[in-house]
Amino acid sequence: MSSSLVLAAGRRAFSRLQEQGLAPGLVHSMLAASGGPKGLMLLQLDRYLTSEFLAQSMQPIDVLGTSIGAWRLSTYTQADPQVALDRFEHFYFSQRFSAKPTREEITAELSRVLAGILGPQGAQEIAENPRYRLHAIAARGKGGAASDDKARLLLAMGLLAAGNVLTPAAPFWFYERVMFRHRQGTFPWHTSLALAATPEFTAENVFPALLATGSIPLILNGIRDIPGAPAGTYRDGGLTDYHLSNPLDEKEGIVLYPHFFPKVVPGWFDKGLRWRGPDVAHFDNVLIVAPSASFIASLPYGRIPDRQDFLNFSAEDRVRYWRQVLTATQRLADEFHDLVSTGRWRQVLRPLAFGRGGDLEH
């Protein structure tokens, strides 16, 4: 029987796991990628990790996400992650739009969803959580990329996409990386990476910062002048850090990276560039846990949820499909529990290597 999960570890993480075992105390950092509804693949695993696996240890854990990844990790960093995950499921599934929604309508609806996920105290709990320390990346626009004028923004995004074919540095011609961080956090971000600013999370800026990291250009409005951060217009963190494939300097334990499919795409505009993949050396101390290709093929329609579901399904059919996926992905949580409790993870764990386009299975 094929495994539902892929466990792939970078060189140092592989060695540490072999020596110390797949123990919750080994996890000192976590990653969560952009991807919109793709992130629903991990909700059941999130429930298991927060209620059982990581609950067996006490060490502080720095968590970093962009877009839906940051929204998912915000549930870890609230006072009761299980309640927060229930709110996430309820409000994310509840999205409703008119036949041809404007950016203002979509922005208002996603604001309602995020407010529901956070609840009345979530922003303060995130800013003050002593154990799970949230960090989130948003992209601060430059020139036309900072404008909400459709023509100017379209031109900027078109130039970015064209430039990205030539160099992965192109997004930084138009956006700069801003990492909102927990005041006690020490996320192992490599010192060579450009961070334009590192404002601290506060109860006042958690909501606009998280809304900004999910604000897709031309679909949502940019979020302006976030308290405590440099003035400007902020957009989706996936523009600079799509699947978070930059080098990390974790020294103590490992970086746990639950991912929604067995593939890592470095940049937002790299999705169609099969010749461009991540550098395996950047994942030296990372353990990726992802659903296998065979598991994904077993899902309804043989794929994972994505943003096209809002166009291809009625609201009722979309929710029905998503609930089928949510039910099926309980298997991922159950299998991870089984692998850890029986020690079978050693049979599944493989050294991390990327195939063409960032494929883990090749």
Image (spheres, grey):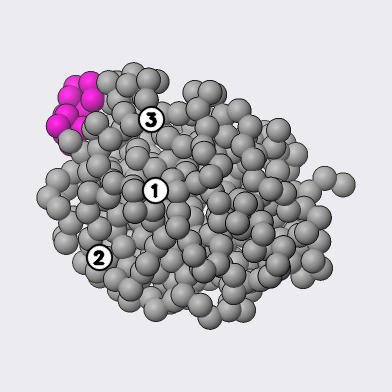
Q: Give the residues drawn in magenta, as a range.
A: 143-156
Q: Mark 3 points at which residue?
A: 168
| First of labels 2, 1 by sequence position | 1
Q: Can residue 128 be seen in this view?
A: yes
Helix, strand or loop for the magenta stretch, by majority: helix
Q: Residue at image x 67%, y 33%?
A: 301
Apparent side of residue 66 relative to residue 296 in the rendered image (left or right): left
**Secondary structure type for disc 1:** loop
Q: Mark 1 points at which residue?
A: 67
On the image, which quarter does residue 248 sit in? bottom left
Apparent side of residue 129 relative to residue 316 in the rendered image (left or right): left
Q: Which mark is residue 200?
A: 2
Tell whether position 154 is magenta: yes
Q: Residue furthest right?
A: 1
Mark pair 2, 1: CA separation? 18 Å
Mark pair 2, 3: CA separation? 28 Å
Q: Could you tell me residue 65's position as x and y percent?
A: 42, 54
- The answer to whether the residue labelled 2 contacts the one labelled 1, judged by CB atoms less than 8 Å apart, is no
Q: Can residue 42 be seen in this view?
A: no
